[in-house]
Amino acid sequence: MAVNSSSRVVYAGQNMAVYNDTELTPQAVARLRERMHGQVIGPSDAAYDSARQVWNASINRFPGAIARCIDASDVVEAVNVAREAQVALAVRGGGHDVAGNGTCDGGLVLDLSGLKGIDVDPVYKIARVEAGVVWGELDAVTTAFGLALTGGQISSTGVAGLTLGGGLGWLMRDGGLTIDSLLSVELVTAAGTRLRATATDHPDLFWAVRGGGGNFGAVTAFEFRLRPLGEIIGGTVAHPIERAAELLEFFQVFTEGAPETLTPMAYFFVAPVIDAIPEPMRGRAIASIAVCNTGDHADSDRLLLPLHAFGPPLVDRVQVVSYTNLQRLFDAGSLPGAQNYWKSWYLRPLTAEARATIVEHVRRMTSPLSIVLVTPMGGAVTRVAADATAFGHRDAAYVLEILAKWDDPAIDASPHIAWADAFFEAMRPFSTGGAYVNFLGNEGPERIRAAYTADGFARLHDVKRRYDPDNVFHVNQNIAP
């Protein structure tokens, strides 16, 4: 079915509805400026071009206005104006979303990046975090008290987006997903109502926001339970890409014998020529294993001996580090401004054939900026029941990320996209069929459905009907009412 450029196609099961978003009018922008405390940026303002940009440079959209909220009352006003004007409403926290759902054409961007409040209670080990905070900012505050929680592995990733999708990270095998530490959310509903959802207040909504994304309202603040965490053992052991097959076989055995306090990750990339990269790696195609060990330091030598002995490596940089430094390990490969196209699967336990397929496609990477990561799940992730939160795929063995990246928007993107698509299809037989919602691009309704269990998806529809029956919040991986 063809739709015009101002329409948004939303799927609900086998039924398709088209929501014809109108353009934001000057009158609506004027109303917004009258009601809000924060800044409203329109196309004629000098700041517009920079304000409309998002992390993924492949996304180039032109909203009717950008509402930079400074408090929750601003969020209420912006939601009300968007609903009344019947325009697309895109909610942006950190903006670190490959699908570009933090912006839209013609509608209103609800920019929460100015909501930067972080309050930590070190006695009760609880943090209240506003929706504009990114993980580097939160980690810096919590670790000052010797506390932390599972967070994104890129320091510029927004706390809001990662949490609402579930929250994979270095600490998940030991401490669970980000949502497993979530105590409450404060949000603004489609009706412009402020409410707080917990396990006892609006429990249906609290269930849904733990994995269901931004479908149910604009979350303005989160409350997390923190865990004690001091210095950890972490870093990278790097080998030439020619050893990719050996490394992946070793990685599988090493991972299967790892305690929950140890998270290894296999990743494949071309090392950039920058000061942060050790000289032996610069400009080379690399097969690497990165680790995070939160266990007893006295036991680390024994635990990590096989990793150090698998060699000789180009570089062995596994050492005592701060958690904040480990969280910045991959930052150089995830800077804003690159073109991005991602594909992802949850994987079953790796077989020899699965490993060979990964190696085959890793060796064919079409761009020196592309990255492939294989991360084990398990541990504390599996100790939460599959139906306890909207994030239901807790039994996956691994998550595979295929990150096609290139830097020049003028070049032909088709080889990079074709590489990622071919890799994705080749790994289908080794997948669970599931997908992590935070790694989805604009991939259609079946892939959104794949992010949830069948029962969970039906339950999410019910919650959506209760809290957003008109699908005001549809610029996302949408679960239509």
Image (cartoon, rainbow, N blue to C red):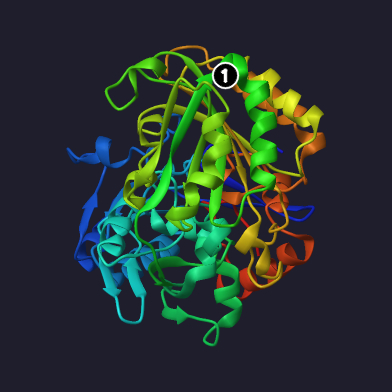
Residue 124 visible? The answer is yes
Q: Which residue is drawn at 43% across and 80% down?
A: 195
**Quadrant holding the N terminus:** top right
In the image, residue 77 sits, relative to residue 173, either above or below, namely below
In depth, the one of 19 and 327 nearer the eye is 327
Residue 469 visible? The answer is no
Q: Residues within 10 Å of mark 1 (few under 14, many from 20)?
A: many
In depth, the one of 300 and 169 nearer the eye is 300
Residue 49's x, y, as percent?
26, 35
Q: Residue at x 42, y 14 (%)?
A: 410
- The three-letter code of the residue at mark 1 reads His
In the image, residue 97 sits, relative to residue 117, either above or below, namely above
> In the image, is 47 to the left or to the right of 425?
left
**Tag count in the figure?**
1
Residue 232's x, y, as percent?
40, 52
**Quadrant holding the C terminus:** bottom right
Residue 48's x, y, as percent?
25, 40
Residue 416's x, y, as percent?
57, 19
Q: What element carries label 1?
A: helix
Q: Residue at x 58, y 61 (%)?
A: 211
- Asked where in the image residue 156 lies, by quadrant, the reply is top left
- Asked where in the image residue 106 lies, by quadrant, the reply is top left
Q: Residue at x 19, y 41 (%)?
A: 45
Residue wearing tag 1: 416
In the image, residue 385 sits, relative to residue 324, either above or below, namely below
